[in-house]
Image (spheres, grey):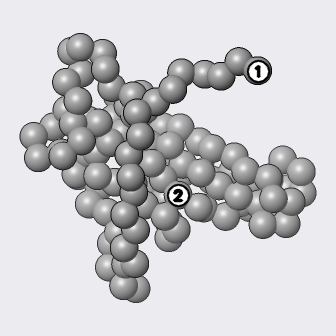
Amino acid sequence: MTQGRRLRQYRMKFERVPDGQPAVDPQQLGSRSKLGGEPEWVQGDEWPDCGDCGTKMTFIAQLDSIEHDEEGNPHRVDAIHGDQHFMFGDVGMLYIFLCENCNESRSVTQCG
């Protein structure tokens, strides 16, 4: 079996967000990853329906371009050398959805 490129590893620390408080600052590029709640769309709503049953899918998570080369970002990687593993289309976002009826998943990628 052939595998794709092996990416560097990061550990994730989860912290529950009190109701009514934002989980992320949309202006803090590279630090907008989160689980649950509502997606913080970069380009506009692309909430998918399940391809099997047609119901609206459940938002699970969003993964930010965590290696964005911005001062103050602890995971920044120099973009000029091309060593960024987690850059989704110019500081974009990867969104993950799940159909709880069919157990099907889907992802949406938006560029920054």
Amino acid type at image mark 2: Ala
Q: How many marks?
A: 2
Residue at numbered disc 2 = 61
View extreme (top): residue: 81
Q: Is residue 76 left or right of residue 62?
A: left
| Crowding at mark 1 (Cα within 10 Å: few <14, some 14-19, many 20+) | few
Q: Residue sitting at 85 percent across and 56 percent down?
A: 54
- Residue nearest the observer in this picture, 65 or 55: 65
Q: Quadrant of the N terminus?
A: top right
Q: Is residue 11 left or right of residue 48?
A: left
Q: Earlier in the sequence, mark 1 or mark 2?
A: 1
Q: Which mark is residue 1?
A: 1
* Image coords of residue 103 (percent x, y): 81, 59
Quarter where residue 66 is shown:
top left
* Image coords of residue 16 (percent x, y): 40, 78
Q: Residue sitting at 69 percent across and 46 percent down?
A: 106
